[in-house]
Amino acid sequence: MDDLIGVPVVGQPVVYAAGFLALLLVVFTGSWAGSIVTVAHEGGHMFMSVVTFRGFDGFGLADGGGGGTSVKDQSWGIGYLLTVVVGYLTPPLLGLGGAAILVHGNAWAILAASVVLLFVAFLYSENALAFVVTLVALTTVVLVLWLGGPLVQITLAAAVVWWLLIGGVRSAVIMGRSPTSDAGRLSRSTWIPTIVWKSFWITVALVCLYAGGRLLFTGTAWPAGVWPFDGPA
């Protein structure tokens, strides 16, 4: 564990290699890479349903990379709106948070958090695909933590961060605008058009990708003087 704490990664080749690998996976494996991002997306729904006292039964994944969370209380209210909104925000925000942790050299925290979150997701998987995806991802991270050398572990931690950042943008861009989509449900509940919600999620994802990528490349999320990120990481 000590080998994964305090290791400088800002601007190092491992950051570029992990980013390139994550980009290839997200672009060329389509729904397969997207399913990992969907797990984070549905995790956001589940987390917020607990915070807003609505509860959930579990989540499932679809073949095309989509998914759904079984929220117990779907009555209209601020809790319902927050539960729906947070889905597309979760992957890019997790990626940005991971970049902030990784830039301080703590790859172990990224992998340990991944194990915990994937284990919880595994427990609440409701269909075979969700079960397989979370099990494979969880097993991979555990094996790398157990058997992988420091370079492999740091590369995986950086790849996880990039995967969430890049995949978060992809999922927001390709999101459908059907009545059953998150944007469609929010549009029915708020009278705000689906395109506005989609644009909001894409904007947040792009900002997170820029800030997270800049953190990993330079150590700062924004150029000097841009509040509130005008100090070094």
Image (tube, rainbow, N blue to C red):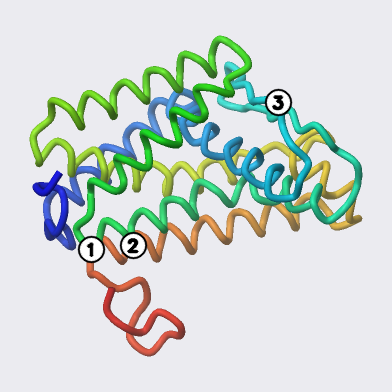
Inspect the image, locate mark 2, and give the three-letter code of the amino acid beneath it.
Ala
Q: Nearer the viewer, mark 3 or mark 1?
A: 3
Query: Which numbered tag is attached to residue 57?
Result: 3
| Separation of marks 3 and 1 at Cα, in angstroms | 36 Å
- Mark 3 and mark 2: span between their CA atoms? 32 Å
Task: Say which residue label 2 marks.
Answer: 100
Q: Which comes sooner in the sequence, label 3 or label 1?
A: 3
Name the mark nearer the viewer: 3 or 2.
3
Q: Position of residue 51 (x, y in %)?
A: 68, 49
Could you tell me how far apart the alpha carbons at marks 2 and 1 are, in whole angstroms? 7 Å
Task: Sort mark 2 into few (<14), some (14-19) or many (20+) by Cα contacts within 10 Å.
Answer: many
Residue with the mark numbered 1: 104
Residue at the spot 37% in from the left edge and 60% down from the top edge: 212
Q: Quadrant of the C terminus?
A: bottom left
The amino acid at mark 1 is: His
Where is residue 52? Give x, y as percent: 75, 50
Image label count: 3
